[in-house]
Amino acid sequence: MKHLLYLIILLSLFSSCTPTPENVQKSDLLPPIYPDYCDITIPENIAPLNFLLRGDCEAVEVKAGETTINSKGNEVVFGMDDWKELLSQYAGKQISITVTALIDGQWTEFRPFTWTVVKDKIDPYLTYRLIEPDYEIWNQIQIQQRCVENFDVNALGHYEQLENRCMNCHTYGNQDPQLSMMYVRGPGGGAILNQSGNLRKLNLKTSDMVSGSVYFGFSPDGRYITFSTNVIIPGFHSLASKRLEVFDSKSDVYVADLKTNTMLRSSLLSDSTVFETFPTFSPDGKYIYYCAADSVLLPRDIKQLQYKLVRIPFDESTGQFGNSVDTLHLPDSKSVCHPRISPNGRHLLYTVADYGTFPIWHPEADLQLMDLHTGAIDTLAIVNSEKSDTYHSWSSNSRWFVFASKRDDGLYGKPYFCYIDKDGKAHKPFCLPQAHPTFYDNNLKSFNAPELGKGKVPFDIDDVVRAMQLEAEEFK
């Protein structure tokens, strides 16, 4: 009986062994891996790039440098320790990756591809909103924080603890986890401001404003935020090829002094004949960049609603605005959205779409990069896809940015990272890696408004729940 049990165990172990390649035929094609991690540039501190092979696959072998992985099925998962050792060994170098797969009983070795590992690290934390990629519902929203060096995730906002309220983006001040803000909407809601773990609830609306704060950005010293007030209208297209349109019927820009709880205003930023939105401070604090468009009759003339990139001087020491608005960019037959300046002041990244201010529903929406030293514009052909590519933020070293892309199916947005080298050249972007290669196939939420941060924020969902019980601070 013991001998029979021993034989069964041996047979079980033998049958569970992963087959290794033999009688291999070579292919000139790249392997059909998902996510697409072929020939990309990655930071030395990124989490393992786990992936799967599309199609029927009985087994797979992957050779990455001196590291070899053999697995049954079509999933390739790196051990965390082995991965860190691999990136440490190849920091500043290229790794050649060869994928060999057993398909219909035949081993096929695909054309090798590379991972270029750069020593320019990416900020280790990413916050984003998880939301259904549709327009009928917005419930069960979460705001999460993910460490991109591993797969740790924690919630900053969760519908279960916040009465299923609508929650808007979490944004850092200068990528600093000690300074950030998020919105919890609805009765009793407000802007939740994080200052070194101390949470304040703010009411960023006064009687003369068309709405509360919507899009915002911090000044370099953290004393001010500039924000837009927007009356946002959803509309539906009659064409089946168009899903949804969202536009502003009114919008203005203000600055809030977080030290004195006062609002700073300029008539140039609240012109009733102009829509102003998407404000952001320059890294030196001397300008507020934003988007502006002449008002049109909406929704009838929505396709004529095209925004230009402008800026107005601002003096941080006095809180005074300049006396004129400069136009930096007015693209032909396009509309500019979401300007973001790299922390080193060199580049300005923005979205262009055919019209309007809600490019997430525009498949033609692309990213462009302006060199603020020369005025040259890079259309980022290597970055953009045939679907919506938009909503972006920079890493603190100005070498990386993250953006939301719907390139896979046109519906679900996912975070992609792009490297900008010292010469200002963009490299092929790659998707946020996940612990399980099938994650994106099974995930039914869009990653919305991804933001990079230098560290983990000093609060969690329980702190936000407690802050919601506070009386909102008023501004005058």
Image (cartoon, rainbow, N blue to C red):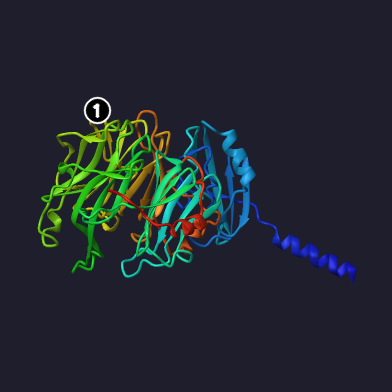
Q: Is residue 286 left or right of residue 71?
A: left
Going 52% across and 58% down the picture, which residue do you hit?
462
Count of all numbered marks drawn on residues in the image: 1
Which residue is found at the position 56% from the left and 51% from the top? 152
Q: Amino acid at mark 1?
A: Thr
Picture layout, residue 274 above or below residue 184: above
Let me know if residue 109 appears in the view. yes
Residue that badge 1 annotates: 374
The residue sitting at the bottom extreme is 1
Q: Residue at x 29, y 44 (%)?
A: 262
Q: Residue at x 23, y 31 (%)?
A: 375
Label 1 packing within 10 angstroms: few (<14), some (14-19), many (20+)? few
Judge by depth and name the residue closer to the eye, 475 or 167. 475
Callout 1 secondary element: loop
86 relative to 469, above or below: above
Tell whether 470 sits left or right of 86: left
Q: Position of residue 299 (x, y in %)?
A: 14, 62
Q: In terms of depth relative to the viewer, which is nearer, 38 or 424? A: 424
In this picture, residue 148 sits left or right of residue 266: right
* Quadrant placement of the N terminus: bottom right
